[in-house]
Amino acid sequence: MTTTAIFGAGVMGETLVSGLIRSGRTPGDLVVTGRTPDKVNALAERHGVRVLPNSEAADVADTLVLCVKPQDMAGLLDEIRDHVAPGNVVVSLAAGITTEYLESRLPEGTSVVRVMPNTPALVDEGMAGIAPGSHCTDDHLAEAEALLSSCGRVVRLAEKHLDAVTAISGSGPAYIFYVVEAMIEAGVVLGLPRATSTELVVQTLYGAATMLRETHEHPTVLREQVSSPGGTTVAALRQLDDHKVRAAFVTAMEAAAARSKQLASGQV
Protein backbone atom coordinates (compact mmCIF):
# COMPACT_ATOMS: atom_id res chain seq x y z
CA MET A 1 0.00 0.00 0.00
CA THR A 2 1.25 3.45 -0.84
CA THR A 3 1.78 6.18 1.75
CA THR A 4 -0.15 9.42 1.34
CA ALA A 5 1.04 12.60 3.05
CA ILE A 6 -1.44 15.42 3.51
CA PHE A 7 0.26 18.78 4.03
CA GLY A 8 -2.13 21.03 5.94
CA ALA A 9 -4.37 20.08 8.83
CA GLY A 10 -7.19 22.50 8.02
CA VAL A 11 -10.75 21.72 6.99
CA MET A 12 -9.93 20.19 3.60
CA GLY A 13 -6.96 18.26 4.97
CA GLU A 14 -9.08 16.63 7.65
CA THR A 15 -11.91 16.06 5.17
CA LEU A 16 -9.55 14.02 2.99
CA VAL A 17 -8.14 12.10 5.94
CA SER A 18 -11.58 11.08 7.21
CA GLY A 19 -12.86 10.32 3.70
CA LEU A 20 -9.89 8.10 2.90
CA ILE A 21 -10.29 6.16 6.14
CA ARG A 22 -14.04 5.68 5.54
CA SER A 23 -13.24 4.42 2.05
CA GLY A 24 -10.94 1.73 3.46
CA ARG A 25 -7.46 3.26 3.71
CA THR A 26 -5.43 2.14 6.72
CA PRO A 27 -4.71 5.09 9.07
CA GLY A 28 -1.09 3.98 9.36
CA ASP A 29 -0.63 4.63 5.62
CA LEU A 30 -1.59 8.28 6.08
CA VAL A 31 0.70 11.07 7.29
CA VAL A 32 -0.38 14.62 8.15
CA THR A 33 1.57 17.82 8.67
CA GLY A 34 0.56 21.23 9.94
CA ARG A 35 1.88 24.50 11.30
CA THR A 36 -0.22 24.36 14.49
CA PRO A 37 0.93 21.44 16.67
CA ASP A 38 -2.25 21.33 18.77
CA LYS A 39 -4.46 21.15 15.69
CA VAL A 40 -2.45 18.54 13.83
CA ASN A 41 -2.00 16.38 16.94
CA ALA A 42 -5.73 16.51 17.65
CA LEU A 43 -6.43 15.42 14.07
CA ALA A 44 -3.97 12.55 14.40
CA GLU A 45 -5.56 11.45 17.67
CA ARG A 46 -9.06 11.48 16.15
CA HIS A 47 -8.08 9.41 13.12
CA GLY A 48 -5.03 7.40 14.16
CA VAL A 49 -2.75 8.81 11.47
CA ARG A 50 0.93 9.71 11.80
CA VAL A 51 2.29 13.24 12.27
CA LEU A 52 5.63 14.26 10.76
CA PRO A 53 7.44 17.48 9.82
CA ASN A 54 7.01 18.52 6.17
CA SER A 55 10.39 17.28 4.94
CA GLU A 56 10.08 13.88 6.65
CA ALA A 57 6.52 13.46 5.41
CA ALA A 58 7.73 14.10 1.86
CA ASP A 59 10.51 11.54 2.34
CA VAL A 60 8.12 8.71 3.23
CA ALA A 61 5.21 9.59 0.92
CA ASP A 62 4.38 8.22 -2.51
CA THR A 63 1.52 10.70 -2.91
CA LEU A 64 1.92 14.26 -1.60
CA VAL A 65 -1.35 16.20 -1.18
CA LEU A 66 -0.88 19.94 -0.74
CA CYS A 67 -3.79 21.43 1.24
CA VAL A 68 -2.17 24.67 2.36
CA LYS A 69 -3.41 28.18 1.56
CA PRO A 70 -2.17 29.63 -1.76
CA GLN A 71 -0.03 32.22 0.02
CA ASP A 72 1.76 29.43 1.93
CA MET A 73 2.49 27.30 -1.15
CA ALA A 74 5.87 28.80 -2.11
CA GLY A 75 7.30 28.20 1.36
CA LEU A 76 6.03 24.61 1.45
CA LEU A 77 7.46 23.81 -1.98
CA ASP A 78 10.84 25.20 -0.95
CA GLU A 79 10.75 22.95 2.11
CA ILE A 80 9.81 19.70 0.32
CA ARG A 81 11.46 20.18 -3.08
CA ASP A 82 14.57 18.15 -2.28
CA HIS A 83 12.49 15.37 -0.72
CA VAL A 84 10.23 14.62 -3.69
CA ALA A 85 11.41 11.41 -5.38
CA PRO A 86 10.97 10.23 -8.97
CA GLY A 87 7.67 8.37 -9.23
CA ASN A 88 5.95 10.51 -6.60
CA VAL A 89 2.77 12.38 -7.49
CA VAL A 90 2.04 15.84 -6.09
CA VAL A 91 -1.66 16.76 -5.82
CA SER A 92 -2.48 20.41 -5.13
CA LEU A 93 -5.84 21.61 -3.75
CA ALA A 94 -4.79 25.26 -3.53
CA ALA A 95 -6.95 27.70 -5.49
CA GLY A 96 -5.19 29.61 -8.24
CA ILE A 97 -1.94 27.59 -8.12
CA THR A 98 -1.21 26.31 -11.62
CA THR A 99 0.53 23.05 -12.53
CA GLU A 100 3.19 25.15 -14.29
CA TYR A 101 3.90 26.99 -11.02
CA LEU A 102 4.20 23.69 -9.13
CA GLU A 103 6.38 22.03 -11.77
CA SER A 104 8.75 25.00 -11.85
CA ARG A 105 9.40 24.63 -8.12
CA LEU A 106 9.66 20.83 -7.96
CA PRO A 107 12.25 18.42 -9.43
CA GLU A 108 12.21 18.23 -13.23
CA GLY A 109 9.61 15.73 -14.48
CA THR A 110 7.54 15.61 -11.28
CA SER A 111 4.01 14.31 -11.84
CA VAL A 112 1.55 17.01 -10.73
CA VAL A 113 -2.25 17.13 -10.50
CA ARG A 114 -4.25 20.29 -9.81
CA VAL A 115 -7.60 19.94 -8.03
CA MET A 116 -10.54 22.31 -7.50
CA PRO A 117 -12.61 20.80 -4.66
CA ASN A 118 -15.63 22.22 -2.84
CA THR A 119 -16.90 22.23 0.73
CA PRO A 120 -19.67 19.57 0.41
CA ALA A 121 -16.73 17.12 0.52
CA LEU A 122 -17.20 17.55 4.28
CA VAL A 123 -20.36 15.41 4.01
CA ASP A 124 -19.03 13.09 1.27
CA GLU A 125 -20.93 15.01 -1.42
CA GLY A 126 -18.04 16.97 -2.87
CA MET A 127 -17.56 17.88 -6.54
CA ALA A 128 -13.95 18.13 -7.64
CA GLY A 129 -12.40 19.00 -10.97
CA ILE A 130 -8.92 17.56 -11.58
CA ALA A 131 -6.38 18.47 -14.26
CA PRO A 132 -3.04 16.80 -15.03
CA GLY A 133 0.26 18.63 -15.34
CA SER A 134 2.58 18.16 -18.30
CA HIS A 135 4.41 15.17 -16.76
CA CYS A 136 1.41 13.48 -15.11
CA THR A 137 0.93 9.80 -15.92
CA ASP A 138 -2.46 8.14 -16.41
CA ASP A 139 -1.84 6.07 -13.27
CA HIS A 140 -1.13 9.17 -11.20
CA LEU A 141 -4.23 10.94 -12.52
CA ALA A 142 -6.29 7.87 -11.60
CA GLU A 143 -4.69 7.92 -8.16
CA ALA A 144 -5.70 11.56 -7.64
CA GLU A 145 -9.20 10.72 -8.86
CA ALA A 146 -9.50 7.90 -6.32
CA LEU A 147 -8.22 10.21 -3.59
CA LEU A 148 -10.96 12.79 -4.22
CA SER A 149 -13.61 10.14 -4.86
CA SER A 150 -13.34 9.21 -1.17
CA CYS A 151 -15.45 12.28 -0.34
CA GLY A 152 -17.52 12.97 -3.45
CA ARG A 153 -17.51 12.98 -7.24
CA VAL A 154 -14.68 13.83 -9.60
CA VAL A 155 -14.49 15.04 -13.19
CA ARG A 156 -11.31 15.10 -15.29
CA LEU A 157 -10.69 18.26 -17.31
CA ALA A 158 -7.99 20.17 -19.12
CA GLU A 159 -6.46 22.79 -16.82
CA LYS A 160 -7.84 25.62 -18.99
CA HIS A 161 -11.31 24.72 -17.67
CA LEU A 162 -10.48 24.96 -13.95
CA ASP A 163 -11.38 28.66 -13.72
CA ALA A 164 -14.88 27.70 -14.87
CA VAL A 165 -14.94 24.80 -12.39
CA THR A 166 -13.97 27.25 -9.65
CA ALA A 167 -16.84 29.54 -10.64
CA ILE A 168 -19.46 26.79 -10.91
CA SER A 169 -18.74 24.14 -8.28
CA GLY A 170 -15.88 25.59 -6.24
CA SER A 171 -17.79 28.76 -5.34
CA GLY A 172 -21.16 27.17 -6.12
CA PRO A 173 -22.19 26.16 -2.58
CA ALA A 174 -22.09 29.84 -1.58
CA TYR A 175 -24.61 30.72 -4.32
CA ILE A 176 -26.94 27.98 -3.10
CA PHE A 177 -26.62 29.12 0.52
CA TYR A 178 -27.33 32.69 -0.66
CA VAL A 179 -30.58 31.58 -2.32
CA VAL A 180 -31.53 29.52 0.74
CA GLU A 181 -30.99 32.57 2.98
CA ALA A 182 -33.28 34.62 0.74
CA MET A 183 -36.00 31.96 0.72
CA ILE A 184 -35.88 31.60 4.50
CA GLU A 185 -36.19 35.38 4.89
CA ALA A 186 -39.17 35.36 2.52
CA GLY A 187 -40.85 32.74 4.70
CA VAL A 188 -40.32 34.92 7.77
CA VAL A 189 -41.72 37.96 5.91
CA LEU A 190 -44.78 35.85 5.05
CA GLY A 191 -45.34 35.10 8.73
CA LEU A 192 -43.68 31.72 9.25
CA PRO A 193 -41.52 31.03 12.32
CA ARG A 194 -37.85 31.08 11.28
CA ALA A 195 -37.29 27.44 12.29
CA THR A 196 -40.28 26.32 10.22
CA SER A 197 -39.21 28.40 7.23
CA THR A 198 -35.70 26.93 7.47
CA GLU A 199 -37.01 23.36 7.58
CA LEU A 200 -39.29 23.99 4.59
CA VAL A 201 -36.52 25.53 2.49
CA VAL A 202 -33.76 23.04 3.36
CA GLN A 203 -35.92 19.99 2.68
CA THR A 204 -37.24 21.55 -0.54
CA LEU A 205 -33.66 22.13 -1.69
CA TYR A 206 -32.65 18.57 -0.75
CA GLY A 207 -35.69 17.10 -2.50
CA ALA A 208 -35.17 19.15 -5.66
CA ALA A 209 -31.48 18.20 -5.83
CA THR A 210 -32.37 14.53 -5.34
CA MET A 211 -34.92 14.73 -8.18
CA LEU A 212 -32.28 16.23 -10.48
CA ARG A 213 -29.81 13.45 -9.68
CA GLU A 214 -32.20 10.48 -9.67
CA THR A 215 -34.64 11.30 -12.50
CA HIS A 216 -31.93 12.51 -14.93
CA GLU A 217 -34.53 14.92 -16.31
CA HIS A 218 -33.46 18.29 -17.67
CA PRO A 219 -34.10 21.03 -15.08
CA THR A 220 -36.40 22.78 -17.54
CA VAL A 221 -38.65 19.70 -17.61
CA LEU A 222 -38.74 19.49 -13.81
CA ARG A 223 -39.45 23.23 -13.52
CA GLU A 224 -42.33 22.99 -16.00
CA GLN A 225 -43.86 20.14 -14.00
CA VAL A 226 -44.25 22.54 -11.07
CA SER A 227 -45.42 25.49 -13.17
CA SER A 228 -49.17 25.27 -13.80
CA PRO A 229 -50.48 27.88 -16.28
CA GLY A 230 -51.63 30.96 -14.42
CA GLY A 231 -50.55 29.49 -11.08
CA THR A 232 -48.45 30.55 -8.13
CA THR A 233 -45.12 29.26 -9.47
CA VAL A 234 -45.49 31.07 -12.77
CA ALA A 235 -46.27 34.29 -10.88
CA ALA A 236 -43.05 33.88 -8.87
CA LEU A 237 -40.90 32.94 -11.88
CA ARG A 238 -42.15 35.95 -13.80
CA GLN A 239 -40.84 38.19 -11.02
CA LEU A 240 -37.46 36.44 -11.14
CA ASP A 241 -37.31 37.00 -14.90
CA ASP A 242 -38.39 40.64 -14.54
CA HIS A 243 -35.54 41.15 -12.07
CA LYS A 244 -33.11 39.41 -14.47
CA VAL A 245 -32.10 36.82 -11.87
CA ARG A 246 -30.94 34.31 -14.49
CA ALA A 247 -28.72 36.90 -16.16
CA ALA A 248 -27.38 37.97 -12.76
CA PHE A 249 -26.30 34.39 -11.99
CA VAL A 250 -24.48 34.08 -15.32
CA THR A 251 -22.75 37.44 -14.76
CA ALA A 252 -21.80 36.45 -11.22
CA MET A 253 -20.16 33.22 -12.35
CA GLU A 254 -18.32 35.01 -15.14
CA ALA A 255 -16.94 37.35 -12.46
CA ALA A 256 -15.86 34.39 -10.31
CA ALA A 257 -14.09 32.76 -13.27
CA ALA A 258 -12.34 36.03 -14.13
CA ARG A 259 -11.16 36.40 -10.53
CA SER A 260 -9.90 32.81 -10.54
CA LYS A 261 -7.87 33.57 -13.65
CA GLN A 262 -6.44 36.70 -11.98
CA LEU A 263 -5.39 34.69 -8.93
CA ALA A 264 -3.76 32.04 -11.12
CA SER A 265 -1.72 34.74 -12.88
CA GLY A 266 -0.49 36.11 -9.55
CA GLN A 267 -2.78 39.13 -9.23
CA VAL A 268 -3.89 39.56 -5.62
Image: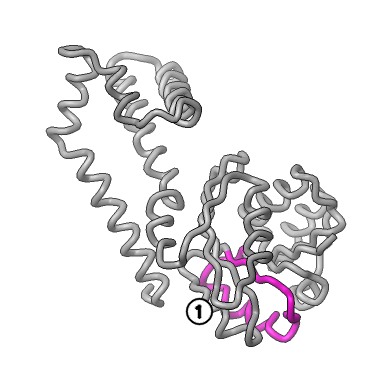
Q: Quadrant of residue 4?
A: bottom right
Residue 6 position within the rendered picture, expressed as x and y whole percent measured from the top left? 71, 63
Please give the name of the residue rendered at 24% of the width and 18% of the height, measured from the top-left corner. 233
Which residue is depicted at the point 53% across and 54% down? 117
Q: Left of 37 or right of it: where is 27?
A: right
Of residues 31 and 226, the one drawn nearer to the viewer in this rendering: 226
Which quadrant, please, contains the N terminus?
A: bottom right
Q: Which residue is more in the foreground, 259 or 106?
A: 106
Q: Outermost residue toward the front?
A: 138
Q: Residue at x 23, y 40 (%)?
A: 246
Left or right? Give the position of 29 relative to 191.
right
Left or right of 47: which side holds 258?
A: left
**Whether residue 221 is situated above or below residue 107 in the rendered picture:** above
What is the magenta range? 67-92
Outermost residue to the left: 242
Q: Quadrant of residue 111?
A: bottom right
Number of dots carrying numbers: 1
Q: Looking at the picture, how far across and down is residue 12, in whole percent?
A: 61, 54
SS type, badge 1:
helix
What colour scheme has been applied to the protein in the rendered image? one colour
Residue 176: % across, % down:
39, 38
Q: Percent from the top left, x then y, of residue 140?
A: 67, 66
Q: Quadrant of the C terminus?
A: bottom left
Which residue is disc 1 drawn over? 100
Residue type at mark 1 is Glu
Neighbor class of circle 1 (other Cα within 10 Å; few <14, some 14-19, many 20+) is few
Residue appearing at x 63%, y 79% in the figure: 77
Q: Relative to 121, is 182 above or below?
A: above
Q: Left or right? Give the position of 40 relative to 111.
A: right
Residue 24: say if magenta: no
